[in-house]
Amino acid sequence: MGRSVDRIDPLTGAPIPFHRNEKRRVEKKGEIKKDFRSFVQSADEAEVALDLPDIPDGADLEGILDEIHEAGERLSEDPGMKNVLAYKRIVKAFLRYVVKNTRQIEHQEGARLSIFKAPKRYTLISVVDKKLEQLAAGILQNQSDKLEILKKVEEIQGLLVDLTG
């Protein structure tokens, strides 16, 4: 009953002795769960590492908007790499400022359905400053042609990277 059956080589018809494979240990790496806050913090740290200009709280938004429009005009006139990077940098800084100052993260715990299970934890993200959010949406809408140029430039760069890789 515990007898092993030899396999047959399909080319020669000769029996192939059955060898029991050593059991392999498969180690599964446990998934590391990150909560939303640590994900946002790591993204912020990555942006700081990119040396983006930081817009201080309470900064003159009109001046920042003027800078975005000027950078957009320079990009329209001369879509060179220097202008693309400058425009990208100022828009990223502005969007980071908007996200940082218009959202509030709040944690709530749900009902405990069983004494054996921990209650679910819910994260609520609420909009704090609606006017600033509307301003950002308006800027993105007004600058859509410049952002389209930026998108095309990045697409071309991606194709070049694919060709060289």
Image (tube, rainbow, N blue to C red):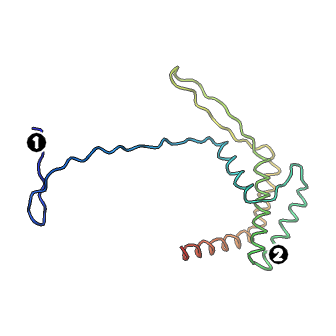
Q: Secondary structure at mark 1?
A: loop
Residue for badge 2 = 74
Where is residue 140 drawn, in percent x and y?
76, 62
Of callouts 1 and 2, the N-terminal one:
1
* Image quadrant occupied by the N terminus: top left
Q: Give above or below for 98 relative to 25.
A: below
Q: Mark 1 — residue? A: 3
Q: Position of residue 24 (x, y in %)?
A: 32, 45
Q: Residue at x 68, y 51 (%)?
A: 43
Relative to 22, is 113 on the left or the right?
right
Neighbours of disc 2 within 10 Å: few (<14), some (14-19), many (20+): some
Query: How many residues crowd mark 1 within 10 Å: few (<14), some (14–19), many (20+)?
Result: few
Q: Residue furthest bottom?
A: 78
Q: Residue 55, located in which quarter of the rendered image? A: bottom right
Image disc number at residue 24? none
Amino acid tagged 1? Arg
- Give the image location of residue 117, x and y in percent: 52, 25
* 115 shown above or below 68: above
* Quadrant in the rendering for residue 151: bottom right
**How many numbered marks have been drawn onto this rendered protein structure?**
2
Q: Is residue 118 left or right of residue 41?
A: left
> Of helix, strand and loop, which one carries label 2?
helix
> Which is nearer the eye, 110 or 53?
53
Classify 103 as above or below 62.
above
What is the three-letter code of the residue carrying label 2?
Arg
Q: Position of residue 86 (x, y in %)?
A: 79, 69
Residue placed most toward the observer, 139 or 25: 25
Separation (CA) of disc 1 from disc 2: 81 Å
Residue depicted at x 72% and y 56%: 47
The residue positioned 53% from the left and 23% from the top of the image is: 113
Of tags 1 and 2, the one toward the viewer is 1
